[in-house]
Amino acid sequence: MTDKPTIKVLVVDDHPVFREGLKLLLNSAGDIQVIGEAENGRQAVQLAQQLRPDVILLDIAMPVLNGIEASRQILRDLPTARVLILSSYREDEFVRTALNNGVAGYVAKHSATKEVLDAIRSVHAKNNYFSASIAKRLNNLVRNRFQAGKTGDWDVPHLTSRETETLQLIAEGHGNKQIASILGISVKTVEKHRQQLMEKLNLHDIAGLTRYAISRGMVEATPALPAMV
């Protein structure tokens, strides 16, 4: 009898202690191997392209690039990869946005260790996996949309990847010059993205953009104050 193939996992979380504990848990499972780790979404996108993991285990609220946008970019470049969200954020907004981006599963951080292992094995086997609390929210969302006669993607403003990256960096307190340096674009292009964000979201100041980013889990609830531009 042949051994089961090892499931190669990329662990992404900005808390080093939690990440270390998760790596120990996964590597002790026997059929799972952590082949890389990242502390923010931008690193996750880069490592996913380099390492080609079977499953990417992603938190949502992380610096530089949040897990939701990271999942979108990863699946755009690696459509066969399986993204599993592991997060303390369980609100409807996060669940439906993650689903819009094509994630294979969503597990609450307070879940038992066995459930995390089961979720990884399930999504690797091309199934979807949702914690009981997440599944309940998802069922309610689907039922409410059906009753309202809505179909297709969830109703969320469509932002490009670059606009999403710019929004997160604005909310983290970076000024236009800093954002331009981080993203490798001109200050004028950053200004253009900021204007487009305000128009799409119908928000007209940095404070409004910051509150929106917090409500979408792009940054923690206590972000840095916006820098003067």
Image (cartoon, helix red, strand yellow):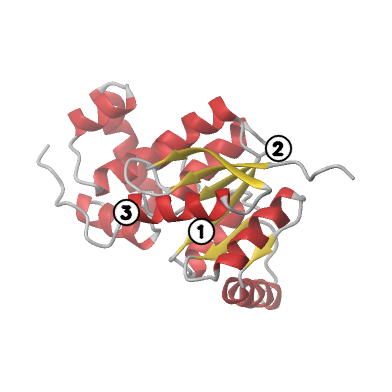
Looking at the picture, which amino acid does disc 2 mark? Thr
Answer few, some or many: residues within 10 Å of disc 1's Cα (few below 14, many 20 plus, some between 14 and 19): many
Q: Quadrant location of residue 80?
A: top right
Question: Mark 3 to mark 1: distance in Å?
Answer: 16 Å
Q: Can you tell which of label 1 and label 2 is closer to the viewer?
A: 1
SS at mark 3? Answer: loop
Looking at the picture, which amino acid does disc 1 mark? Leu
Question: Mark 2 to mark 3: distance in Å?
Answer: 28 Å
**Front residue of 112 and 164:** 112
SS at mark 1? Answer: strand
Residue 104 left/right relative to 74: right
Residue at the spot 51% in from the left edge and 69% down from the top edge: 92
Kindly check if marks 2 and 3 are in contact, taking CB atoms under 8 A apart as contact: no
Q: Which mark is residue 86?
A: 1
Q: Can you tell which of label 3 and label 1 is closer to the viewer?
A: 1
Is residue 200 among the parts visible in the rendering? yes
As drawn, which residue projects farthest toward the left?
228
| Residue that badge 2 annotates | 80
Residue at the spot 17% in from the left edge and 51% down from the top edge: 224
Residue 134 place in picture, x, y as percent: 58, 71
The answer to whether 11 is drawn above or below residue 108 in the figure is above
Residue 1 left/right relative to 81: right
**Front residue of 59 and 153:** 59
Looking at the picture, which amino acid does disc 3 mark? Val
**Mark positioned earlier in the residue sequence (1 or 2):** 2
| Residue that badge 3 annotates | 219
**Mark positioned earlier in the residue sequence (2 or 3):** 2
**Front residue of 29 and 46:** 29
**Front residue of 64 and 171:** 64
